[in-house]
């Protein structure tokens, strides 16, 4: 189906200049050139697209001839990245119906780590098999995941092309898998995470047949590489709709394949305390994104894994270990298990450990401790984490208030605040008291 310019809302003023440049240059070189995927979906809905993806019938080599600033990435299926300062426009060649052996490569370029330049051998291999990788525009549409993600905006006549009923589904607010959902999830289990992400972000319903196999096939996510899972987790929780996404992941029983230990800890709610730290962390992440503030993945991951770390730590303290040692051990073992599912790069795990360790230091404010803590480069994140714990009923609200005031007042008042601390509250609490308190913490 072709939707003429007068019948859809996409205007060129909403398309980035660089994307337009790419589209026009391809067109002028005699190639087909379309916007495709999420950007067309978002433009049709009147949303601002995150990025712009282009498809063409030009081969990667031909794309490179047209653009001197193009870099080919990917192995079997090569894409061109056209760089314009910080903006990258991704240009792909129409992709054909797959043969069995090229199934595992995602249609879309993955994170930077995997987007390495192909070696000479890989390029030759790709060139040899080009004939069965590239295809027609219709074949390209059928390879995409959901109907609303398979619309094309044609730069030649400004029409929208729809091979799969995506325009109707967009109007009805429905996410529908192209083809047989079960087979498409088996082909690429990450599509289960994607459908949930789009449902949360767009507020769309997942069509019945598309939703039906998810619970049963969720376990296939265990076969996806932890590196790819990490990229997906960031998209799931840093897209601005993490609270809804989390609810949906839980209700489709997918969360356990992302954070198994966390999921287990949620199942074993102790003494009726609801686990509210995580939802609160997600709400605050969404609020920060809505306000245009930066978000830190280390903070989010620290929140996800806090409950398992805390449970493990309590256990070790119960066995007689000092709490700081117990925390270090607990962090090691929880992170090690987690890496098998979703990789946690060192640039995250270091700050995560600091955020956790500082939770033990916050109550110990005597002498120079408080002033020292305030100087710590992770203070802000750790303090935000303390606030979350306090809101969740998992840390003493008076302690959180104390730290809030401590930051606001001048040096003399700080000294006075430390002096005014009752000895028991400021120093190391007695072991028995601490353990009982820890055991009752809701998380
Ligand atoms: P976002 O707004 O998150 O960028 P998007 O739909 O653009 O959403 P991308 O990951 O950027 O998602 O992918 C671009 C397009 O590539 C998708 O719209 C879809 O057509 C196709 N695509 C991406 N990943 C897959 C997949 N795993 N299986 C099939 N098609 C995919
Ligand atoms: Mg996109």
Image (spheres, rainbow, N blue to C red):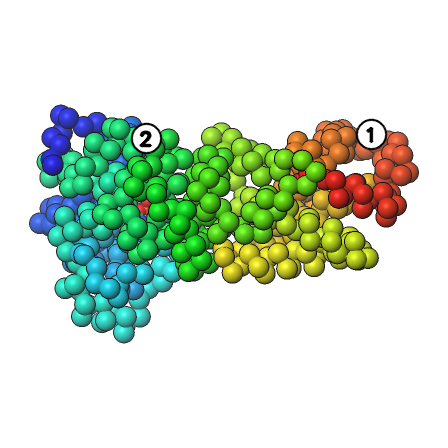
Front in this rendered view, residue 356 or 265: 265
Query: Where's the N terminus, which quadrant?
Result: top left
Q: Is residue 178 left or right of residue 49?
A: left
Q: Position of residue 276 (x, y in %)?
A: 61, 35
Q: Position of residue 178 (x, y in %)?
A: 24, 45
Say which residue appears at 11% left-offset and 39% top-offset.
156
Q: Residue furthest top?
A: 6
Q: Position of residue 24 (x, y in %)?
A: 16, 43
Q: Is residue 409 left or right of residue 330?
A: right
Q: Position of residue 204 (x, y in %)?
A: 34, 32
Q: Visible in this render: residue 400?
A: yes
Q: Residues within 10 Å of mark 1 (few under 14, many from 20)?
A: few
Q: Residue furthest left?
A: 30
Label 2 sits on residue = 47
Q: Quadrant of residue 36?
A: top left
Could you say which disc has been placed on residue 413 in the image? 1
């Amino acid at each position: 189906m072709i939707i003429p310019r007068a019948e859809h809302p996409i205007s060129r003023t909403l398309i980035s200049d660089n994307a337009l440049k790419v589209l026009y240059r391809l067109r002028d070189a005699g190639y087909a050139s379309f916007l495709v995927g999420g950007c067309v979906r978002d433009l049709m809905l009147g949303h601002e697209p995150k990025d712009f993806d282009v498809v063409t019938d030009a081969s990667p080599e031909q794309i490179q001839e047209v653009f001197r600033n193009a870099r080919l990435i990917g192995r079997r299926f090569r894409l061109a990245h056209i760089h314009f300062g910080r903006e990258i426009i991704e240009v792909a060649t129409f992709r054909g119906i797959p043969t069995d052996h090229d199934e595992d490569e995602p249609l879309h370029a993955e994170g930077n780590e995997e987007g390495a330049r192909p070696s000479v051998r890989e390029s030759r291999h790709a060139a040899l098999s080009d004939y069965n990788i590239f295809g027609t525009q219709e074949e390209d549409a059928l390879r995409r995941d959901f109907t609303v993600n398979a619309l094309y905006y044609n730069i030649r006549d400004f029409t929208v092309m729809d091979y799969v009923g995506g325009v109707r589904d967009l109007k009805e607010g429905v996410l529908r898998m192209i083809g047989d959902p079960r087979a498409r999830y088996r082909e690429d289990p990450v599509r289960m995470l994607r459908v949930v992400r789009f449902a949360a972000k767009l507020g769309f319903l997942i069509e019945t047949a598309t939703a039906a196999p998810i619970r049963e096939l969720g376990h296939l996510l265990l076969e996806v590489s932890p590196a790819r899972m990490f990229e997906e987790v960031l998209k799931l929780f840093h897209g601005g709709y993490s609270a809804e996404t989390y609810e949906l992941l839980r209700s489709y029983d997918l969360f356990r394949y992302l954070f198994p230990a966390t999921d287990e800890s949620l199942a074993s709610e102790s003494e009726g305390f609801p686990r509210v730290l995580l939802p609160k962390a997600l709400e605050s992440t969404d609020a920060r994104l809505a306000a245009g503030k930066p978000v830190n993945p280390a903070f989010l991951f620290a929140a996800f894994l806090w409950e398992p770390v805390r449970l493990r730590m309590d256990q070790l303290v119960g066995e007689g270990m000092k709490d700081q040692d117990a925390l270090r051990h607990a962090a090691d073992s929880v992170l090690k298990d987690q890496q098998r599912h979703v990789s946690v790069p060192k640039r995250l795990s270091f700050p995560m450990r600091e955020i956790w360790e500082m939770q033990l230091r916050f109550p110990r404010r005597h002498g120079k401790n408080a002033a020292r803590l305030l100087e710590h480069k992770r203070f802000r994140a750790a303090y935000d984490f303390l606030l979350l714990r306090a809101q969740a009923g998992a840390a003493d609200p008076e302690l959180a208030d104390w730290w809030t005031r401590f930051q606001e007042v001048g040096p003399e008042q700080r000294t006075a605040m430390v002096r005014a601390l009752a000895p028991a509250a400021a120093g190391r609490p007695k072991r028995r008291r601490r353990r009982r308190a820890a055991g009752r913490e809701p998380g």
